[in-house]
Image: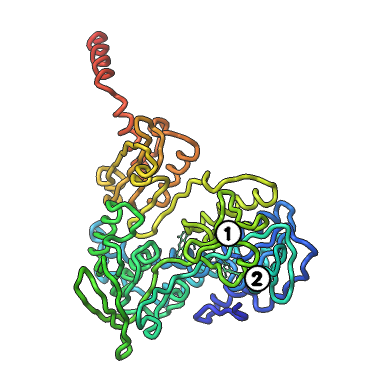
């Protein structure tokens, strides 16, 4: 446990943050004889579980060893989206002449001010996740390291909490890849990069996944010279190639160096600089940077809780083993969020916490497999997805029809100068039942919810074609896809019948 966690720099905003998420003068309460729920970890999953259960009247204890709010508030979604917002303004000013707006001086980025804005907003948002907020909602909040001491007790800071049910919401942490010389040279992860107050002139990002891509583009726009390295031949390996290609082209245009299908061999510290040695397609190369950001995946926090002794099975890569009801291999212990999920998102942590509340407190049988989980990578353009990809459908033996519309033919996208991108919707072959969709657009993350509602509400493309979308909006692209589906319903036989009807009635 970190007794006095600090978030650097030690300014008024980070002090305000700490006073909310790890109050220095906090006194742990006396435990009640037995809790309905003991929750380990106060990230999104833990906060939602604890607050939701207490709101229903359960006696709940919530334990946090580091910072309330977990990754999302402190080192993830919130700080990254704040700096992405600043970086989008830089891109808008860069592109302003295309809109007839002249900004002859270009954008002048005040990097320390960008980071200060982020810290100010993070501190403001931290009130939602504050320890005292949970206390006010009736949760017993304990600061300290949680460890199971028997099948129905958890120890924290010298106290033993007895539980009927426990929920592990211990989250995940950045993976430190075993690259020779990396530790000696020094590197940033998402846990440290948001403490920067000076812009690194040259930054290499190791990892071309969502985290790497979002931060690489933001730093490039804020004035760093960024290089992304990844073993995969394309960025965002989980996404379809047509989506990733659009992003790659954007990155190249914006001056980001892409070194893909590559392996970082070693890092060397030389005269205060960092030399990256790599091998790519049989050839060796090297280049020099000032700083390194590692975004090479996330490892579940499964160590140090005595899970072995209480029969909770886990895998160091996949995390805590859970069944479809989020039960671990101990019948009294459940898990939610990043510590057990393949899809590590805040909204998944939230959704799994809600399942756990129902299943622990009410003998419910809510299922993980019933969830429809969308996601979005907040690059520019954004890439959002929900449901199945073509390859998922193929693996499951589901035949699909795919409807794809480009934004370069959509009035609002043309007016906005945001024509790059597409929407692609897969339906079960011969039907209008949506099984998956990908959207590449500047605000794809806002648009994917319409498709998610349709999947969850079993609304097909036929109905979407009848839904009036305001003109002109980018969401009209969804209706255009639905119209494209409708056109396939007009069979040659129907067309022939219509022709005869029209000639007969004129
Ligand atoms: C840079 C970045 C950007 C991201 N952006 C997005 C985004 O835009 N949208 C999105 O949906 N997701 C995003 N994510 C992912 C999101 O942050 C996580 O999915 C989410 O925070 C997971 O919540 P959680 O509660 O499962 O775990 P965490 O937030 O990791 O919380 C777990 C908590 O448990 C505590 N803990 C662990 N072990 C113990 C113990 N033994 N005793 C006591 N406490 C313990 C930890 O200290 C931690 O506070 C991003 C992640 C990163 C890194």
Residue 57: x and y, percent?
Answer: 74, 53
Q: Is the C-beta of the residue carrying label 1 under 8 Å from the nearest atom of ligand 1?
A: yes
Tell which tag, 2 or 1, sits nearer the viewer: 2
Q: Which mark is residue 45?
A: 1
Please identify the quadrant where the N terminus is shown: bottom right
Q: Which element type, helix, strand or loop, lies under badge 1?
A: helix
Disc 2 or 1, which lies upstream in sequence? 1
Please identify the quadrant where the C terminus is shown: top left
Q: Is residue 487 left or right of residue 302?
A: left
10 Å neighbourhood of mark 1: few (<14), some, or many (≥20)? Answer: many
Residue 152: x and y, percent?
Answer: 72, 62
Residue 421: x and y, percent?
Answer: 29, 50
In the rendered image, the residue lying farthest to the right is 33
Q: Locate residue 470: give its quadrant.
A: top left
Q: Is residue 204 left or right of residue 355?
A: left
Residue at point 62% right, 57% down?
Answer: 334
Q: Locate residue 63: give its quadrant.
A: bottom right
Residue situated in front as seen by the camera: 421 or 257 = 257
Asked if marks 2 and 1 touch (Cβ < 8 Å), the reply is no
Q: Is the C-beta of the residue carrying label 2 under 8 Å from the nearest atom of ligand 1?
A: yes
In the rendered image, the residue lying farthest to the bottom is 271
Residue 379: x and y, percent?
Answer: 36, 60
Q: Which element type, helix, strand or loop, lies under badge 2?
A: strand
Q: Which residue is mark 2?
A: 147
The total of numbered circles placed on residues is: 2
């Amino acid at each position: 446990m970190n007794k006095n966690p600090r978030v650097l720099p030690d300014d008024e905003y980070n002090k305000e943050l700490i006073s909310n998420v790890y109050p220095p003068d906090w006194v742990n309460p006396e435990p009640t004889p037995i809790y309905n729920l003991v929750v380990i970890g106060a990230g999104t999953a833990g906060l939602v579980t604890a607050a939701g259960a207490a709101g229903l009247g359960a006696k709940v204890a919530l334990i946090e060893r580091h910072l309330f709010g977990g990754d999302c508030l402190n080192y993830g979604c919130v700080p990254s989206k704040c700096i992405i917002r600043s970086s989008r303004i830089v891109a808008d000013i860069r592109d302003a002449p295309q809109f007839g707006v002249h900004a002859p001086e270009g954008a002048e980025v005040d990097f320390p001010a960008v980071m200060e804005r982020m810290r100010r907003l993070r501190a403001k948002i931290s009130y939602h996740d504050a320890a005292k907020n949970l206390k006010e909602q009736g949760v017993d909040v304990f600061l300290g390291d949680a460890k199971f001491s028997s099948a129905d007790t958890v120890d924290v800071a010298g106290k033993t909490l007895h539980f009927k049910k426990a929920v592990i919401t211990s989250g995940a942490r950045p993976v430190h890849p075993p690259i020779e010389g990396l530790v000696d040279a020094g590197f940033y992860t998402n846990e440290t990069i948001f403490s920067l107050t000076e812009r690194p002139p040259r930054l290499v990002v190791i990892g071309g996944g969502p985290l790497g891509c979002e931060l690489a583009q933001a730093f490039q726009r804020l004035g760093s010279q960024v290089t992304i390295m990844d073993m995969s031949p394309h960025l965002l390996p989980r996404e379809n190639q047509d989506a990733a290609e659009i992003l790659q082209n954007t990155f190249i245009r914006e001056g980001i160096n892409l070194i893909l299908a590559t392996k970082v061999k070693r890092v060397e510290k030389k005269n205060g600089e960092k030399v990256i040695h790599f091998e790519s397609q049989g050839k060796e190369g090297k280049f020099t940077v000032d700083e390194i950001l590692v975004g090479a995946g996330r490892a579940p926090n499964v160590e140090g809780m005595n899970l072995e002794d209480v029969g909770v099975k886990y895998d160091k890569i996949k995390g805590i083993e859970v069944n479809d009801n989020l039960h671990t291999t101990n019948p009294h212990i459940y898990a939610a969020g990043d510590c057990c999920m393949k899809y590590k998102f805040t909204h998944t942590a939230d959704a799994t916490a809600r399942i756990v509340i129902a299943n622990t407190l009410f003998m419910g049988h809510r299922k993980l497999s019933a969830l429809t989980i969308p996601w979005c990578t907040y690059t520019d353009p954004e890439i959002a997805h929900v449901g199945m990809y073509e390859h998922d459908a193929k693996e499951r033996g589901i035949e699909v029809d795919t409807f794809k519309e480009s934004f370069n033919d959509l009035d609002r996208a043309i007016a906005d100068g945001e024509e790059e991108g597409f929407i692609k919707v897969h339906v079960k072959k011969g039907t209008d039942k949506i099984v998956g969709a990908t959207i590449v657009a500047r605000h794809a993350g806002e648009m994917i919810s319409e498709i998610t509602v349709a999947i969850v509400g079993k609304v097909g493309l036929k109905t979407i074609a009848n839904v009036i979308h305001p003109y002109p909006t980018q969401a009209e692209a969804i209706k255009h896809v639905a119209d494209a589906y409708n056109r396939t319903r007009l069979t040659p036989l129907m067309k022939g019948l219509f022709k005869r009807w029209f000639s007969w009635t004129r």
